[in-house]
Image: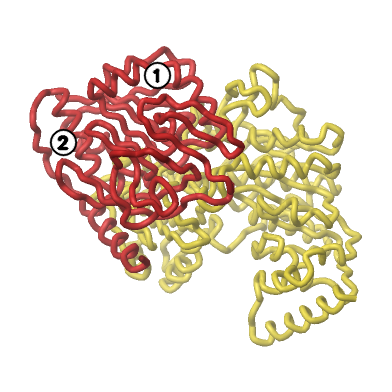
Chain colours: A red, B yellow
Amino acid sequence: MKELKILYLYPDLLELYGDYGNIQVLKYRLEKRGFKAIIDKYCINDDAPDFNSYDLVFAGGGADNEQSILSKDLIKYKDDIKKAVQSGVFFLLICGAYQLFGKYYKGVEGNIVNGLAVFDYYTEAIEDRKKRCIGNIVISANLNGKETKVIGFENHGGQTFDINTSFGKVLYGNGNKFGDSQEGFMTENVIATYLHGPLLSKNPEVADYIIKYCLDRKYNENLILEKLDDTFETLCRNQLLEIFKDSQ
Amino acid sequence: MKNFIIVVIIKIMHIVLKIFGKNGGNLLGKLAYEWNPNIFKYFKIECPIVAVTATNGKTMTNNAIGHIFKTAGKKVISNVEGNNMETGILSTLLKNCTLTGKLNADFLVFEVDEGYVPVVFKDLKLDTLVILDFFRDQLDRNGEVETLILKINDFLKTYNGNLVLNNDDPNVARLGKANPENTNIKYFSVEKYDFATEKIKEAGEGKYCPFCNTELKYEYYQYSHIGKFVCPNCDFGNNKITTLATDIDLKNRSFKVDDITYNIRFNSIYNIYNFTACVCVASIYNIESETIKNALSTFVLNNGRLEEVEINGTPTVINLAKNPTGANVSLRILNEDDEEKELLFVLNDNIADGFDVSWIWDINFDKLNNVSRIITSGKRAYDIAIRIKTSGYPASKIEPYLSLSDAVNSFYSNNIKKYVIANYTSLQPTRKEIFKHK
């Protein structure tokens, strides 16, 4: 049986906005097609994980306090993570994890939290603590040449700069900064984004993009994924896109 | 003089509203507060004020405390309808005071929103504060739980009144250290119940000691992060318990404190906590246990908080769930019941609910016990359908309806036992729709 190995980073600390749902959706869509999903969790004080042995690495968003605790731990694996990214392991990074993979995060008081600097972007907190990019968001992402509407919910005070390849164009909502035209960061094997929801729950095409990439890479083929019954997802997407269109 | 005029005007408005059959909710308090934010100082209160705050269980506990006092023959003024921000409490005070601001009562009992405790009790002398629990709740509106806790912690630094704390919630128990000079701190706790687990089963907060950052050690979890814990490093959590509930029997709906059996009308572990807090408060004011027994055995809250009704012969349990813990508690009751049943889940995303519905992914839908069908409704009917499907429950047994009346019609097309979970703004419309089938 074909299988994907998924590494879930800091499930006890980065678990604020139901982001774990992304793993559940991946598992669901793999198992429905007869593939196996092996999910390993890594927490602070566990043995160092072998990043390169995984097909997919996932990390979500967390509370500010938790985020600063784990950044010190994560930085130990900076070089391993860089190598894994270069060798093509897929990284799905949401919100806080998205920020941590950049150069740094500058807090409200000007304090700098060093990132992994795997990517060149950086994030600065907005001075007014009460001001955050909060709300529903729709972007248009290019998935294997196909423009796809991606729906989520953003809730971040950080403004991310120096993105050259974004996840998508903003159709509704804010994006990387207040009123930005671009959202997130993307390469062939990385999706880093502010979108909660959880992201994959309302965007089966993004989930399948990730699954196809990982299986193709691992088994060296060009798979056509079996279609699943996405009736609820389609109803949900149509309903929400209609609402957001009206309120634009 | 200004305050006197405000009170007179508000009183007249209250009478006018009453003539038109309106209650006014927060409105009167809001007007008065805008006129003079210091109006709280105007009231002459000679009786004790008891307040309840928490993420979940405020309304239930507030009403139960009031009911106990009333059963003891006391005169109680309380915000029983749940208007719990500063304007809501102000409304209650204004409606019940004399023109000179006097409140004639033996007790004032208030539920207070977690974020508003410092505002409300800046100028009102609080005699007893009860804190039940802190859970993640509408993150896009309230922010992180930690911010709220720190706010209350700051307030407690100079507070010397009675403080009734849930010792089984680390985020509540830690507040007992806010003011080391306060000698009136009373911790309550509940002994392990039948469905307690060794591992955490539902989303929770507070995994680390707030004082030394060591991972907390749990002997067991009752629900979410509520359970018996201690910090292995600094001993945080090891407090002397004033009120301990034992012999928890949810089937027969009873528990004991100091060997006295209390019969109740609810069958949820979460209510055992609420009522243990009530017993603790009642003992502070020397209410006799016989009176507490009578009061708790008759106490119900017919507003969709674990409300049990028969709809055309079909037993139905309705419960509000504003956050993951609320929903998880409802699912616990459902799973602890072996009978065949159907579930209706109604989810809205209006302002008062929070626009972000991602919290439904923190609800544990795994291994539902004998649920033959699930109907979803509300503005986000499809979101919750996707959530339940992904947990492994068969999609073919899930029916989403955007229209609430269609959902409820389909729900009552048979007479299998019903469980209903509805979030904040969907609760009353759902009840209304259900009661049409009565």
- Of mark 1 and mark 2, the one earlier in the sequence is 2
Which quadrant of the view contains residue A58? top left
Identify residue for label 1. Answer: A78
State left or right for residue B388 relative to residue B426.
left
Q: Give the secondary structure at mark 2.
A: loop
Counting from the top left corner in percent of width and height, residue A44 is at 48, 20
Q: Is residue B73 left or right of residue A19?
A: right
Query: Residue at coordinates 48% horizontally, 48% vertically from top-left?
Result: B327
Give the residue pinned by disc 2: A33
- Identify which amino acid the numbered label 2 is placed on: Arg
Image position of B185 with respect to A151: above or below? above
Q: Position of residue A211 (x, y in %)?
A: 20, 34
Residue B121 vs residue B387, the one in the foreground: B121
Q: Which residue is located at x 84 percent, y 38 percent?
A: B184
- Percent x, y of residue B254: 63, 44
Q: Chain of mark 1?
A: A
For disc 2, the neighbor class at 10 Å (few under 14, some 14 to 19, many from 20) is few
The correct choice, above or below, for B183 with respect to B23 in the image is above
Percent of width and height locating residue A60? 41, 35
- For label 1, the SS is helix
Q: Nearer the viewer, mark 1 or mark 2?
A: 1
* Tag count: 2
